[in-house]
Image: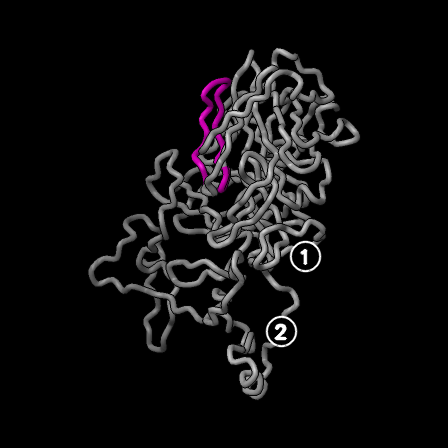
Amino acid sequence: MVSRRTFFGGAGALAISAGMVSRAGAATLPEAATMDKATTQPPLSPPNGRPYNPVVTLNGWTLPWRMKNGVKEFHLIAEPVVREMAPGMKAHLWGYNGQSPGPTIEVVEGDRVRIFVTNKLPEHTSIHWHGQRLPNGMDGVTGLTQPGIEPGKTFVYEFVAKRPGTFMYHPHADEMTQMAMGMMGFWVTHPKDPNLHRVDRDFCFLLNAYDIDPGSATPKTSTMLDFNLWTFNSRVFPGIDPLVCGLNDKVRIRIGNLTMTNHPIHLHGHEFVVSGTDGGWTNPASRWPEVTTDIAVGQMRAIEFEATDLGDWALHCHKSHHTMNAMGHNVPTMIGVDQRGVADKITKLIPDYMVMGDKGGSMGGMEMPIPENTLPMMTGTGPFGGIEMGGMFTTVKVRKGLARNDYKDPGWYKHPAGTLAYEWKEGDAPMPEAAMAPDTVSSAPKPGDTVLKVRKGSGHSGH
């Protein structure tokens, strides 16, 4: 983390929002921390104030605060940012404190919170505290509850975090532009009792989408539905970090949707319950097991499960085109079309022409050149070859023996002998029943063990 101190002399540089804030309390601004890394940062344990169990923001971080006369003070900078969406592509977005999404804000139920918002954008903005109960004049709707924050000005929002839960923040000013450019952030209000709703690992991220032409860097802000980059926290696979969990950890994943469509988020290998929504915690008696939860536009969902099974388990949106990058939507389907005669004629005019998609899975070996600052449509490599995913896709990695705050990527899972799918050949003996037993000993093969492997066909990884 890189920090910078931004101080404005005197009250003249400070525009007060509709709520009343004392001049003494607003005389100097708290430090505006910024982040220049796109990797998941460690949880921020509270240095002061009441205790809570911190969250881990996927490919993000938590905003530090200062305590002043019993009030938690934060400083957000609305500004242009450069966000690496995955290695090989950077986007010119708008965000907060160096990143899009902005930093997660964590407070405790009953905390009095004061947020200074400085506008370094070329137009006015505001911040709406999505889902919060607060004075009407702090709700952040430009023209309705406040004037816009003009470029170079700082506004102050102050309210009590009345109820625990999972929330967001985003502008209610020129929304079509500002949200399409990436202006959003996560907010978590923890319960007063740190043992209430306690879990071992608590992750959070936002769903957002962009329309960025291959070779360019700035999103189209008038796109309604036809986006080509679907992201977790403005990152796409393989740039999204894994969610690392210890075996038998109780895990919570909080997800907010600020795209223009719904997303059925699916977890492999485990079932979960929806433990929280925008409106608060769900009654335990009302919960039922799922493996997919559909998150509509503007909604928050908290899901919980026990990480009972070792492995690298996929977590992704189940809309198949949301697990692709820089996707073109106007490519004709050529499956079953014999293109040999046409291809011969075209290659005489265009030597680099390639037949595409006549068998359905023929793009994996093409290695076609792509424009600078864009990504292959399907990308990412696993231990058995191309994963053939992009966009809203990552993994939940469950491992034995992790320390409580160990979130480092443990690498690829080593499957115990007899637990890996394999190619059957005529005459092979069936798998012994003992091989189907749960992994209780070591994952390393023993002398004499048959090492089972997977043969993969062609895919889309090079497109």
Label 2–label 1 contact, CB within 8 A: no
Image point (66%, 27%), residue name: 153
Screen quadrant of the N terminus: top left
The quarter of the picture where residue 326 lies is bottom right
Q: Could you give the CA–CA distance between mark 2 and mark 1, rounded to whole angstroms?
A: 19 Å
Which span of residues is magenta-colored?
Answer: 40-60
Q: Residue furthest left?
A: 447
For the residue marked with disc 1, what is the amino acid?
Asp
Residue 110 image offset from top left, x and y in percent? 60, 19
* Secondary element type, mark 1: loop
For the residue marked with disc 2, what is the amino acid?
Thr
Q: Is residue 186 left or right of residue 429?
A: right
Question: Where is 299 relative to 360, above or below?
Answer: above
Question: Where is 409 relative to 324, above or below?
Answer: above
> Could one spot residue 108 in this view of the protein?
no
Mark in the foreground, 2 or 1: 1
Residue 414 image offset from top left, x and y in percent? 33, 54
Image point (37%, 45%), residue name: 399
What residue would you read off at disc 1?
Answer: 226
> Could one spot residue 88 in this view of the protein?
yes
Please tell me which residue lies in front, 191 or 463: 463
Image point (56%, 46%), residue name: 234
The reply to whether the magenta stretch includes residue 42 is yes
The quarter of the picture where residue 16 lies is top right
Question: Where is 214 relative to 346, above or below?
Answer: above
Question: Where is 36 relative to 75, above or below?
Answer: below
Image point (37%, 59%), residue name: 383
What residue would you read off at disc 2?
Answer: 333
* Secondary element type, mark 2: loop
The reply to whether the magenta stretch includes residue 378 is no
Residue 174 image offset from top left, x and y in percent? 73, 40
Please tell me which residue lies in front, 440 or 433: 440
